[in-house]
Image (cartoon, rainbow, N blue to C red):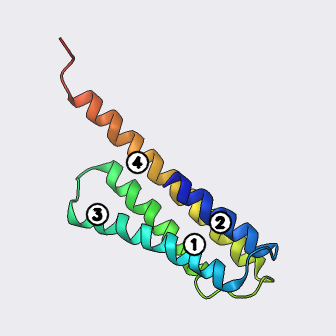
């Protein structure tokens, strides 16, 4: 998701600065939204118990809230909504990454040592 995160944040900046038109911006929002929808669906189809999942879901909720600010945004002057959205998306991504790291650490602790 790192490349996609960079892509949506760049699109937000590009739109706010007038470098990206509304249609192109909304296409980027739709692309990122589809990825987030796939991530949510994957978690719902194969849930894993425990705290890391809760943090992952919280991150998805933050990202979805950020996308809510962006969907339908068609005016370059709506920079405060873009800033709020970027912040929510960034924070949500951080939570997802922390969740993935926690799950990996938990898996390392539960597997027997080699040898």
Image disc number at residue 81: none
Distance from the alpha carbon under mark 4 to that under mark 2: 20 Å
Mark 2 Cα-neighbour bin, 10 Å: few <14, some 14–19, many ≥20:
many
Q: Is residue 54 above or below residue 19?
A: above
Write down the residue under mark 3.
42
Q: Nearer the viewer, mark 2 or mark 3?
A: 3
In the shown orientation, is residue 34 left or right of residue 78?
left
Secondary element at tag 2: helix
Image disc number at residue 99: 4
Mark closer to the chain start, 4 or 1:
1
Mark 4 Cα-neighbour bin, 10 Å: few <14, some 14–19, many ≥20:
many
Q: Is residue 25 above or below residue 92?
A: below
Distance from the alpha carbon under mark 4 to that under mark 1: 19 Å
In the shown orientation, is residue 90 left or right of residue 81?
left
Image disc number at residue 66: 1
Secondary element at tag 3: helix
| Quarter of the rendering containing residue 27 | bottom right
Q: Nearer the viewer, mark 3 or mark 4?
A: 3
Q: Nearer the viewer, mark 1 or mark 3?
A: 3
Name the foreground residue: 81 vs 31: 31
From the top left corner, tell me how far across and down residue 14 is, in percent. 75, 69
* Residue plotted at (56% across, 59% down): 5
């Amino acid at each position: 998701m790192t490349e996609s995160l960079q892509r949506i944040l760049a699109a937000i900046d590009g739109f706010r600065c007038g470098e990206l038109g509304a249609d192109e911006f909304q296409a980027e929002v739709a692309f990122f939204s589809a990825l987030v929808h796939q991530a949510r669906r994957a978690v719902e189809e194969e849930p894993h118990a425990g705290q890391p999942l809760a943090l992952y879901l919280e991150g998805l909720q933050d990202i979805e809230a950020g996308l809510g600010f962006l969907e339908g945004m068609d005016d370059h002057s709506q920079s405060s909504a873009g800033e709020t959205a970027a912040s929510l998306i960034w924070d949500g991504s951080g939570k997802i990454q922390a969740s993935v790291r926690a799950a990996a650490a938990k898996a390392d602790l539960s597997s027997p040592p080699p040898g």
